[in-house]
Amino acid sequence: MSQQEHIGPSTEELVIESREALRDRARRRAARLGDHFKREWQIYVLLLPTIIWFLLFLYKPMYGLQIAFKDYSIFRGIDGSPWIGFEHFRTLFENDQFLRAIRNTVIISFFTLLFGFPAPIILALMFNEILNQTYKRTAQTIVYLPHFISTVIIAGIVITAFSPSAGIVNTILEWLGMDPIYFLTKPEWFRPIFVGSGIWQEAGFQSIVYLAAIAGVNLSLYESAVVDGASRWQMMWKVTLPSILPTIIIMLIIRIGNLLEVGFELIILLYQPATYETADVINTFIYRQGLQQGQYDLAAAAGLFNAVVAFILVMTANTISKRVSRTSLW
Amino acid sequence: MTRENDTRFGRETMRKTTLSATFLATTMLAQPGFADEHLRIVEEPLELSIHFHWPRNQGYEEDYPVEQAAREMTGIHLVDATAGRNTPDHNEAMNLLLAQGDLPDIVGGNRIKDPVNQYGPQGAFLPLDELIEEHAPNIKALLDERPELRDAMASSDGKIYYVPYLPDGKFGRAWYIRQDWLDALGLERPDNVEELYQVLVAFRDQDPNGNGKKDEIPIFERQWEELIRFVTLWDGRSSGSDTYHDFYVDNGEVKHPYATEGYREGMKNLAKWYAEGLIDPEIFTRGSSAREYLLSENLGGLTHDWFASTSGYNAALAEKVPGFNFAPMLPPESVSGQRIEEHRRTPLKPDGWAISYANEHPVETIKYFDFWFTEEGRRLSNFGVEGVHYEMVDGEPVYTEEVLTSDQPVNSQMWEIGAQIPRGFYMDYAYEWQWTSDDAREGIELYEQNDLLIDQFLGVSFNEEEQAVYDKYWPSILTYMLERQQAWILGTGDVEADWGEYMAQLDKRGLSDVLEVMNSAYERQYES
């Protein structure tokens, strides 16, 4: 310390100098930022509606989340209702039907991920190998179509297809000499039917993302692979898949974030008291308890729990992915 | 509208409305002593805002001919201020209204009883008892005559917060059987459970539709819950009101039908019938088109459904299914020899209208509510406008030919003109009788001659603590009950083997607490 006093400027001077340098840098940065805004303002204007949408529809409603901790009366309003702490959460976790709903949500989500996630990737890879363009485009349109059909109609199609008297599934079973099965009242059949119809509806549309990623793969990679004598199969495994891996991982993280958001509209349309055992998920539980019985505070508590778990899941997935593959959402 | 005016049709409609408006106006002028004058409530026209939600048309149209006539008669003008016009759901509409804070003068629509009785004591709606006592002689007379209505309407603090829609007529659903199938097989109408069973077996095995295939479905229902009503054949119950799975009253005590011995016996037998193929194997998923499909394909044999619409199939299918005759029959006698029809029209709907705390003219409003219970007001709310939709014949309102012969059913015509909508009014069964088919009339008379109906449970109003207990336990109890119910019918569970465990589960889930608050609320409401 004492030596420094002789060699360089005093501490005071240093402080002043560094302050000035900081101010200078800030000024320069502000100027740069100003330039940047001036240059790129159109982009920010384009971004604005999305930001406003987020604030209005995703951030502002969070204010209402507090009713999960209140004895909510719609007439007294959010502010006028008294606080009751974790009472609603206690009620929920004492209810075996809620615990069952959590279990069903996790199981259905897991199977949806296990079978539903690879499906569009496989589909995209297969489309990529089709050489006849007309055939390819027709096939793509056909697999996209179910995505645009309303859930109510999907449910109608599923109910009809699995009907014991007129359904195509049971007709085939009868050809094979088996007895017809009343699928939609059998708890053990609900999950396969639900996961399967989900894949049927969405796999085609979801494959678009992967097709786009495949289109972006550098062609020179394939050329050099051909020069090295790689077969088509090897090119798919060694070139295409590794190249679209970042896209796959990003999609996987997003999927994990939405893992608990089971498409409950379809469940409500397909389930019966007879299949609650395997079909009742958190969202359908919320629907029956909260909306049909008017218990908004309890439903908010269940929804909040759902959101917290989803948040933890997506954070974990992102961290693991960052460590393992260096690909992450943020 | 402007585009329509260019067409001839548009111009004609315009002229017609102008003409009838002029006609109305001149009648009013030419006859100052017109009978309507005594119904006038205010000298100067008074505007009151109204929220009105109902499933068929959210909102209250100011150009309803009925509203226009009511304006002429009373001087009160209702102005639409409906919240949540885009939602078909009454809960949502009501909650949107309450959440937005400032209420319109009048709040009305379907299923307002529970919210009004819940938020009335908190200050959202005015208690009507004194207002009715002093300013509504017609409503008062009706409530004095039928005190059970007053009990059923009351909130937990004992006060009335809404003026209800009171249906008229007794019978709703009835047992219907394919008379032509019975004739084809040479069978009599079944009169008790055993005979019913034999008939159903014959329907299943003896090919009554004559197509050589064993494709008949003896029992079918549009709502699977109707199947549960069959437990009345074994002296069980399925519900105490026209809401499914509701509580019922047995000797002054509120009970739940799904926790009684009769239900156990009934479920045992229904499971047997289902296993034997007497019940539609797809009963739970066939849904609302079941009746249409199974009747028009000549497959269905017996159901429990509404008189008017079910009888309509005889005319509708006369060509498609030769000899088709779907006839109402008396409910078969139960195992103990009782004959009951569990379903009936409720004498009191949870629909109607209420006065909000923001209303600055409560006296005028209650007088206006009372107007709909006067002779003229009741006719207006039932039949529409005199001279346009009905004529008085021998002192009785009779629909015009135009209304009766229209392609559109009379009830939906009425909804469009603002009659028969769920405001607080007293329905007149004569309205429906006029367009009930002869087949249905015969059935209703058959039911009328027998003493079939049982008392309805009109519901209770909970205080806050009772509501909390009910909310905490009831949803999961009901879920459990329905799960077991379907499992037993489908044969994935056995009611005899499960019953002990079932009752223990109900107890564990708090059924006794729910019954306790039900009974305390019931005693407060009906026995004080």
Image (cartoon, coloured by chain):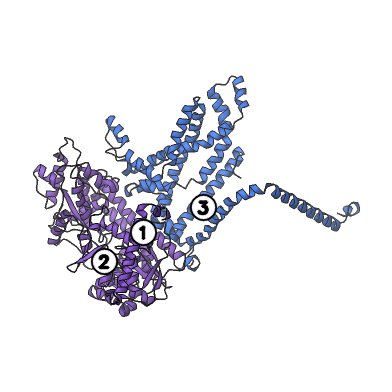
Numbered disc in front, either 2 or 3: 2
Comparing B255 with A118, the one in front is A118
Which of the numbered marks, if any, corresponds to residue B386?
A: 2
Q: Which residue is mark 3?
A: A308
The residue sitting at 81% across, 53% down in the picture is A21
Residue B163 lies, with reference to residue A129, above or below; the image says below
Q: Secondary structure at mark 3?
A: helix
On the image, the x and y values in percent for residue B325 come to 15, 47
- In the picture as drawn, the residue positioned furthest to the right comes out as A6
Specify the subunit that label 2 lies on: B
What amino acid type is highlighted by mark number 1? Met
What amino acid type is highlighted by mark number 2? Glu
**Local crowd size for mark 1, using a 10 Å CA cut-off: few (<14), some (14–19), many (≥20):** some
Q: Secondary structure at mark 2?
A: loop
Q: Quadrant of residue A166?
A: top left
Comparing A194 with B490, the one in front is A194
Q: Is residue B151 left or right of residue A227?
A: left
Residue A294 lies, with reference to residue B491, above or below; the image says below
The residue sitting at 42% across, 48% down in the picture is A264
* Residue B369 in sight in this render: no
Q: Which residue is mark 1?
A: B14
* Residue A327 in sight in this render: yes
Same-chain check, marks 2 and 1: yes
Comparing A254 with B52, the one in front is B52
Q: Using the numbered discs, state the Cα–Cα distance from disc 2 to disc 1 in whole angstroms.
A: 20 Å
Q: Is residue B408 left or right of residue B218?
A: right
Q: Using the numbered discs, state the Cα–Cα distance from disc 3 to disc 1 in whole angstroms.
A: 60 Å
Numbered disc in front, either 3 or 1: 1
Which chain is depicted purple? Answer: B
On the image, the x and y values in percent for residue B52 come to 38, 64
Which chain is depicted blue? Answer: A
What amino acid type is highlighted by mark number 3? Val
